[in-house]
Image (tube, rainbow, N blue to C red):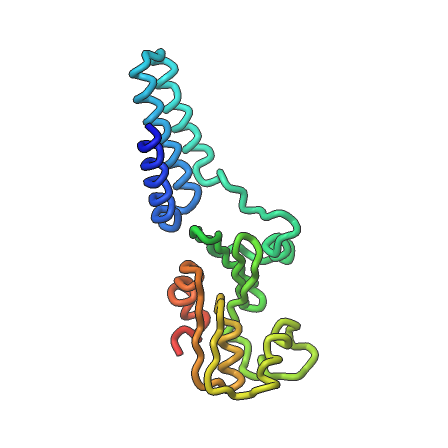
Amino acid sequence: LYFVDLCASGIGAVCFTFLLRPLGAEILMWVVSAVALCGFILYALTVGLSRIYIFSLPLFFLLGCTFWGNNLINDHPVHYKRAAQLRKWGATLEHSEWTTIAKIDVWSFDETGSKQITMDGDCLTRMPSPLYPKEYFISEEEETDYWVRCQRIPYFIRPAPDDVLVIGSGGGIEIVMANAWGAKNITGVEINPATYGLVRGPYSDFLKWPKW
């Protein structure tokens, strides 16, 4: 029995790993619930539980799917997370994707054309808008974004480097920064497959830099 339990746990972990991203958390939760319900029905039939109780459960399950299908998970993050601040500032949740590493959300500000990515409601990474000219990343004006001013500090020490390695490239703000400062070869490394897939796929036309 213990061996069977371990095998079932292993199969469940593998299924979770490969099904979470394509199905999303809400659908995967319903699929897991349906599998558990089938197991309960099979077991209940073998022990002679009343069929009225057995077959009433699928009815409640169908009602749950109908009324709460995509609302099992609250997409309103707690107040101290970056995603809550973005929502407060009027950002629109444009896209969400689940991975075994984190939940990825893409937020957009229509008036500026900028987009930002959060992981689990925090860990912000920016998707630089093509509306920002090259001069924006190298300007010494005080109006320049605080984070942009911080990220260009290495280039004051060594402008126009031959090679730049960006660890955790995210939405690509550091890659655009390196290009603006004249880096000849830029290599970006990103561990999250969802973030990589977004910048190389549906958002590549918006960002421009993945097609350099």
* Residue closest to the eye, 9 or 189: 9
Question: Please, which residue is most extreme toward the front here?
Answer: 2
Question: Please, which residue is most extreme toward the right here?
Answer: 142
Quarter of the figure with the C terminus: bottom left
* Residue closest to the eye, 60 or 182: 182
**Measured from the top left, where is residue 87 in percent x and y?**
60, 54
**Measured from the top left, where is residue 38 in percent x and y?**
32, 27
**Measured from the top left, where is residue 25 in percent x and y?**
43, 44
Give the residue displayed 29% in from the left and 16% down from the top.
Answer: 46
Compared with residue 77, is residue 69 higher up or lower down, i.e. above or below?
Answer: above
* Residue closest to the eye, 208 or 195: 195
Compared with residue 188, is residue 91 higher up or lower down, i.e. above or below?
Answer: above
Choose top left, top right, bottom left or bottom right for residue 61.
top left
Give the residue displayed 36% in from the left and 17% down from the top.
Answer: 54
Choose top left, top right, bottom left or bottom right for residue 41.
top left
Give the residue displayed 52% in from the left and 88% down from the top.
Answer: 160
